Every structure is written in structure tokens, then in C-alpha cells.
Amino acid sequence: MHKKPGLGLKARFAGIAGRAAYLFVAVLVVTSTTACYSEPKEVVTNLGQAPSTDLQYCVVCGHESQFEPFGTGTEIRGNAMCPHCGSLERHRLLRLFIASRSLIRPGMRVLHISPQPALESVFGGFSGVEYQTSEIEGGSADFHFDLTSIELPDDSIDAFLCLHVLEHIEDDRRAMREIFRVLKPGGWAILQVPLYRDRPLTFEDPSITSPVERETAFGQFDHVRVYGWQDFRDRLMESGFDLQVEDFVADFDTDTQKRMGLDKEEWIHICRKLL
């Protein structure tokens, strides 16, 4: 059993009391591509009382299926990827969390880094939202830049989404400072990385450069570190963010976590730029 971590002064571990999981899914899942999360459309009336099934339910695309294994090297996870839209645990968690907080609203400018296609389709359809994407190279993204040198003005983004990208960046502290710089005062960023709840300190070694060695040391050939949960939070706060950490998956019972294919180990990191 993992112990809950201690926190820095600015971080708040905002675990929410458990509640009936079917209420979340009934209220939060959005299928209309023109809808905004502040006006969710109910598409599942009562997942908790649905007929028993071995199939899993994807809150991104709405399909029921058997999720597939996903990962590389030593980090292959079972029942991780939706075969219809390709969403992974972190994508389904992000969709549920943003819905639960009505975080994306009309009039906002949202920047999504290396978006998963199904989420890009969902978020890009929100009415009244300026949704933009960025890749470091290639593809049809709106921007192509390195996160350590974001080619945007200060205080220009309302919301910033970046899932499992920072572990690929050698100077991650500089990238965090750049994200803070472009956020508007009052804006927020959700920054997620692979974390292990039993590892408080980050392991990184710049002398490890070959793909084979990186896969052995960091779990994937293109990762440059394994983050520790405490160290990751410290780096975010040192970059200027007011940090809130939520154990959002714990709001769902174990059966519902499995049914929706959520990772019980993943916390949500909400990084705010205070006014």
C-alpha cells in the first residue's frame, strides 16, 4: 500500500471524498463536438447500475470494448489503450477531470502540447474556445516549437495542457518556466508525467544517452529521467506555479476505475499562475 505524500507549503493535496462513480460518468461525458465542458451532455444515465460486462468503457469516444496493452520496453501496461480512439489512461482521466471542474469555458485560449488525436478532436470542437496545438516538428499543429523556447508572448494563454512530455526534455526546468511565462495571470496548466508513488526523488543521469541504456534506466528509449513525486512538485513550484495536487482517480471505486481504464497511481497536477 502506498502512503500519501507530504507536501510543500504551496502545494495542496486536494483529494475529494468518494462518491458514486456513475454520477460522474452520467454528468461528465460529452459526445457533441460543439459542446463545452461547462455545458456537458448526459450520455450515460447510470454506469454504476449498468448490466455486468467484461468490456470497458472509453469516456473519450464512448465505445465499449476490451482495452489493449500499451507501452514500450519494461513499461507495458495491460488494458491501457482504447482500440477505437487510441486513448490511454491519462487521456481518459484528463477528460473526466476537466469536465468535473468545468475548466474550459468560452472565450478561453487553450494550448495543447502533442495532443492525442481523440482528445484533439474533442477539445477542438468546443464552441467559443480558441483551441491550439503544438508539436516540436511535423504534423498539422498550429505551432512547432521547443517547450524550452515557446514562441509566444508573455501572458498570452489561458490554459495549457501537457501530458507526458516533460520526461522527454533534458532541461525540464526551463520548459516549466516557459509554460509559466506564457500563461496569463489567473491561468492554469495541467502538467502530467509518469510518476511512481513510492519514489519521492527523481532519477536522471545526463551521461545516459543511448536508446538502449535509456530504456533500461528510464523505462523508455526516449525518456531522460524517472520523476519522483516530491521532486516533480518542487520543480513546478520553483518555476513559479501555485500547485494543487488531486488524487482524482480515488473518487471512483475500484470496479469503475477498471471499467473506464484509469490508472489509480496517477495524480492530477493543476499549476496556476496567480493574479
Image: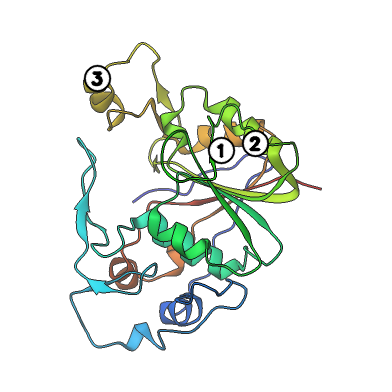
Give yes or no for contact between labels 1 and 3 (Cβ–Cβ under 8 Å).
no
Q: Which residue is mark 2?
A: 237
Q: Amino acid at mark 3?
A: Glu
Q: Identify the residue position indicated by label 3 in the image.
A: 213
Task: Inspect this view and state whether residue 264 appears.
Answer: no
Q: Residues within 10 Å of mark 1 (few under 14, many from 20)?
A: many
Is residue 158 placed above or below 35 in the rendered structure?
above
The picture quadrant where one finds residue 243 is top right
Spot occupied by residue 199 in the image (x, y as percentages of width and height): 40, 35
Q: Is residue 153 above or below residue 80?
A: above
Question: What numbered label is drawn on residue 233?
Answer: 1
Residue drawn at x 52%, y 62% is 123
112 with respect to 249 (left or right): right
Residue 117's image quarter? bottom left
Q: Amino acid at mark 1?
A: Arg
Residue 216 seen by the camera: yes
Cα–Cα span, label 1 and label 3: 26 Å
The one nearer the camera, 31 or 91, is 31
Q: CA distance from mark 2 to mark 1?
A: 6 Å
Q: Report the residue at 23% width, 62% height from top.
A: 83
Rendered residue at 54%/74% (across/down): 34
Q: Measure how far apart labels 3 and 2 are at the Cα level.
A: 30 Å
Mark 1 element type? helix
Local SS, label 3: helix
Q: Which mark is residue 86?
A: none
Q: Nearer the viewer, residue 44 or 265?
A: 44
Please provide percent x and percent y for residue 236. Answer: 60, 36
